[in-house]
């Protein structure tokens, strides 16, 4: 192997890349691939400058494509001295994807709702946060045959010390993992695990408000919460309702560690009907 191939192989071998099994110098049909992940049907080739106008490479790629394989080609300079960029592209292969999200909340939502006596309502009754918030996320998804899975890390980071009413909601961190199995072309089942951590409210209303119930007090917000979800997904494959999708999920709390005093959470049933155009 060339130095570039050795460098890349040191990161692909022994299922180091998200557990996928890559083989080096792998025979496939009439060709030998530099590296291949057969379960994802992905071919990785590392080329020098002599391949820049190679008709034989085009023929190889065409044969692989006709037989369901995807070919990714990298120059030696893409691997040396560091292969990070190549590894990111390989990670975003045909059966698995990794992507990030960086969003901001706009508008911030109203936080000035008051009761009939002119007092601010409970904090949880306000529509928004009243602050500009940063919403980062990192999502990995995979698929193999009838199985699919994914993991997502996400958060809500408050970018201001307080809103116009004098307080700030706690930051939120959430980790979600899920798996699904497709029984038929029109039905699948899924299971999902969710962990949520939320900080308590900082500051307090700068106007008249009550202190008579737990929801009126800032320390009674946030905590750590664990949930498990069980879902069924259906899609209409043909006929007058072709493309319509129905998703149903039961989300069950399994462990709560709230800050202060909060009501016990109950299970929740979600149902969604959609149409793909």
Image: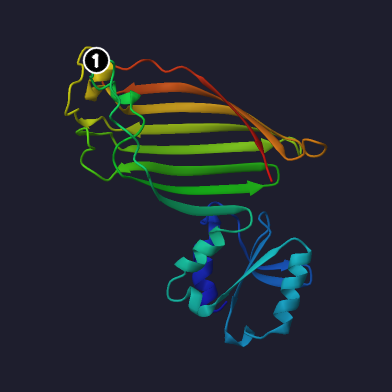
The answer to whether residue 189 is above or below residue 86 is: above
Whole-percent x, y for residue 221 in the image: 29, 25
Whole-percent x, y for residue 175 in the image: 43, 38
Whole-percent x, y for residue 232 in the image: 65, 29
At x 33% / y 27%, what residue is drawn? 126
The answer to whether residue 115 is above or below residue 51 is: above
Name the quarter where the N terminus is drawn: bottom right
Query: Quick one: which residue is furthest to the right in this view?
Result: 239
At x 52% / y 56%, what residue is drawn? 17
Which residue occupies the foreground of this view, 8 or 74? 74
Tag 1 residue? 117
Q: Is residue 161 left or right of residue 246?
A: left
Q: Is residue 143 left or right of residue 104?
A: right
Disc 1 element: loop
Q: Residues within 10 Å of mark 1 (few under 14, many from 20)?
A: few
At x 16% / y 29%, what residue is drawn? 206
């Amino acid at each position: 192997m060339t130095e570039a191939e050795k460098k890349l192989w040191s990161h692909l071998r022994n299922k180091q890349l998200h557990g996928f099994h890559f083989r080096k110098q792998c025979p496939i049909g009439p060709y030998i691939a530099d590296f291949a992940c057969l379960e994802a049907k992905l071919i990785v080739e590392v080329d020098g400058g002599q391949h820049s106008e190679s008709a034989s490479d085009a023929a190889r790629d065409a044969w692989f494509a006709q037989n369901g394989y995807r070919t990714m080609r990298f120059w030696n300079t893409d691997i040396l001295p560091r292969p990070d960029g190549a590894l990111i592209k390989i990670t975003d292969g045909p059966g698995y994807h990794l992507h990030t999200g960086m969003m901001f909340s706009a508008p911030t939502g109203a936080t000035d709702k008051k009761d009939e006596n002119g007092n601010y309502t409970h904090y949880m009754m306000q529509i928004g946060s009243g602050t500009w918030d940063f919403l980062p996320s990192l999502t990995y998804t995979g698929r193999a045959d009838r199985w699919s899975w994914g993991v997502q890390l996400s958060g809500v980071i408050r970018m201001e010390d307080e809103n116009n009413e004098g307080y700030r909601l706690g930051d939120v961190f959430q980790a979600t993992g899920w798996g699904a199995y497709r029984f038929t072309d029109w039905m699948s089942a899924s299971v999902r695990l969710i962990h949520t951590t939320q900080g308590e409210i900082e500051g307090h209303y700068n106007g008249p408000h009550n202190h008579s119930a737990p929801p009126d007090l800032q320390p009674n917000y946030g905590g750590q919460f664990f949930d498990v979800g069980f879902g069924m997904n259906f899609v209409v494959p043909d006929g007058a309702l072709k493309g319509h999708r129905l998703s149903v999920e039961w989300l069950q709390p399994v462990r709560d560690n709230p800050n202060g005093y909060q009501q016990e959470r109950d299970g929740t049933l979600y149902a969604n009907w959609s149409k793909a155009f």
